[in-house]
Amino acid sequence: MTESVSPIVEMRGISLAFPGVKALQDVDFRLFPGEVHALMGENGAGKSTLIKTLTGVHTPDSGSVLLSGDTVAFSSPGQAQHAGISTVYQEVNLCANLTVAENILLGREPRRFGGIDFPAMRTKAAEVLTRIGVHIDPASVLSTHPIAVQQLVAIARAIAVDCRVLVLDEPTSSLDAGEVAELFRIMRVLRDEGVAILFVSHFLDQVYEISDRMTVLRNGTLVGEHLTKDLDRRALISAMIGRELGTLEAIEDASERLSASGPVLVHAEGLGRRGAIAPFDLEIRAGEVVGLAGLLGSGRTELARLLFGADKADSGRLLVDGTPVHLRGPRSAIAAGIAFCSEDRKGEGLVADLSIRDNLVLAMQAARGWSRPVPRKLKDQLVEKYLAALDIRPANPDALVRTLSGGNQQKVLLARWLVTEPRLLILDEPTRGIDIGAKAQIQQLVTTLAAEGTAVLFISAELEEVVRIATRIVVLRDRHKIAELDGGASVDDVVELIAGEHVPEEVAS
Amino acid sequence: MTALATRLPSRFLPVLATVVLFALTFGVGSVRYDGFASGQVIANLFIDNAFLIVLAAGMTFVILSGGIDLSVGSVVALSTMVTAEGLKAGWSLPLVVVAVLLIGSTLGLLMGLVIHKFDIQPFIVTLAGMFLARGLCFLISVESVSIKDSTVRSIATAVIELPGGVTITYNVVIALLVVLAALYVLHRTRFGRSVYAVGGNESSALLMGLPTARVKVGVYVISGFCSALAGLLFSLYMLSGYGLHAVGMELDAIAAVVIGGTLLAGGVGYVLGSLAGVLVLGTIQTLISFQGTLSSWWTKIVIGALLLVFIAVQRTLVRQRPS
């Protein structure tokens, strides 16, 4: 793995846009034979998109992909596989209704007299499975095996062909420690055979254990390429979530707004849910912006979902205005004045085929109950007010939400919740994947809302953003609340806590 | 396959259930009615349902891939119409056969292409195909056209004597050949296994590098071909072509496939199950005609009840499967 070896994969200046989102902008990437290369970045940084560009699922808008020095343009995963690039995706992308042997060899079954030669297929599948040390019956149906074994079968499929590049997109998320060790053993064997391995994982320990080199992406742009031994955890986390590159509209420093907070609105006491988030205490005051910081999978969304009643807590209790409330579901949370802007705005938030007006009215009607229709005049007033307040473009209430850009969709979603006049607004990644201008507007809106007395819980993968607008920062790691910092904290303080290099004094109970 | 059966009994459960159901209904008939348990009654099951067996075989491909084909009944009618009118116009028999099979396959190809290229629900596209084919029948003639061609009539009435004095028609031979061919294609070819893969998980199949487009279009071509072939068999059976032939037969074919244990969601099922499904439907019909006093519509009621039971059973089986 010396620099004199030429890269087997080289991607130059890759850009790719989806409607409303710039998924990749001018990204360069190199992969050398015989190395394990980690692709790092938060959710939405463009890792999966880059991988799918390499494997022929997406075609880049500009830029070129070189394999062994030759320009290639795959238009299907089949072509990429044929060229020696095999991929194992995060979800097991196999057919659970077929046998293990078929899943390994589907599309390249050994044939005899024109028909599939099943005995030969089973023998060949058994050989591949033995090569990676998995001992299961190739004739058994895939769905009868646990997910971890299915994942290994997916790897067996990937290496059953003459594979020069193996892409592993978060293969470990469903594996336990022993299974991960097994996977790493297999990866080392393949690496020593000269296979180039591209590895994606959100577990830093794993990345540092297995990888030789890393490339860091943020917001669809390349942050840098480093040898793993040259980049310590702090530097890596900073690169992933630290500094904002663009210039943002100046937002008053959070520390200046410390005095703004009012009475305690929501108080969680030992609230927790097994497997989602360990019991935590949390106070949110009116007029406060509480930031939630932590890496992906640290329990950010899970915490928010408990407060919103989307998941049921199995320990602790929640007090609103000092009175214990029992949230049976989102409806009772909405009744208590809690709003939740979900991370998945397309799936959970907006009705894409309705107009802006209809989306706003939906929320209003839900809040009023079906028996009290919203008067036309009030509708128009409200729609007009929020279109202007949030600067939604186009400012046409009859435009279909589906046709708006990501940033404007996010604003409509926000407006939808604002018409219900919530007292606590939970924002889960409200600025992900939207352009810098819309981002600044949303941040500005959050501070304005807080100044008017709304409590805001702000979740973002971008640390700098959290630090800038939060009056208080709650830090999560491995599904535990590990600290609470006041608004004066710097990005470095938070990074240190997340990286877990030492335990600071401010750790909350 | 026998080795598989001992290892994976749960996968064969729906098919086994259908076979047991067939044995049961047939057993009931044998006990209650004299002459029911004869070889000729079984042979008649095949003779009277040969076209349905062919239709069900084609439908099995489509449903296995996760789709549905509502056009098959109309394509049968169109095929009988083309056959009858073609023969009346003096076309030679081979020409008629080729023309009918080409028309059916082309219709299937067109529907498959629309489904794939425009990503439209197969239900809607084949519903359109159903109206189209039915309408074309009446464009050719609104009357029933009888087939007078002597060769065709002799083929239609020719019988093959089996040991034990049981006779079958050539239709039965063709239907069984179709089932064998379907078995081979589904289980021994890459195309067949890809049909199962696409039905199991289409996006996985695509990411695994399988030709999903070819599979999705191909199954409708196969279904179209089978519908045309079934139409030829139906012409021999009825000796006429008529736009109102085979009304609702697509539903019989779907019912047979589902009762045969094929999951409507795709990915799981066997052609032999569909064959058993057709035989169950046929037996119920025979039972009711032997009974003599019941209205023939009781057949539909029993089929409806059976369908409900089988779909409920499938649902529970799917829930048990770890996803």
Image (spheres, rainbow, N blue to C red):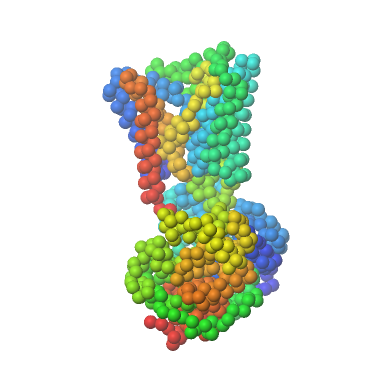
Percent coordinates x, y for residue A138 in the rendering: 46, 51
At horizontal 60% and vertical 64% (from top left) the residue drawn is A392
Q: Quadrant of the C terminus of chain A?
A: bottom left
Q: In which quarter of the image is the N terminus of chain A?
A: bottom right
Percent coordinates x, y for residue B192 in the rendering: 53, 41
Relative to B88, residue A242 above or below: below
Percent coordinates x, y for residue A470 in the rendering: 51, 78
Which residue is at the front of the view, A469 or B102?
A: A469
Relative to A254, residue A192 above or below: above
Question: Is any part of residue A119 visible from this angle?
Answer: no
Rendered image quadrant of residue A438: bottom right
Which residue is at the front of the view, B128 or A427?
A: A427
Percent coordinates x, y for residue A10 in the rendering: 68, 65
Outermost left residue: B31
At horizontal 36% and vertical 30% (from top left) the residue drawn is B301
Residue B201 appears left or right of A399: left
Relative to B132, residue A401 above or below: below
Q: How many marks?
A: 0
Which residue is at the front of the view, B122 or A27?
A: B122
Residue B18 appears left or right of A66: left
At horizontal 37% and vertical 72% (from top left) the residue drawn is A320
At horizontal 53% and vertical 52% (from top left) the residue drawn is B204
Rendered image quadrant of residue A372: bottom left
Relative to B223, residue A449 above or below: below
Question: Is any part of residue B2 visible from this angle?
Answer: yes
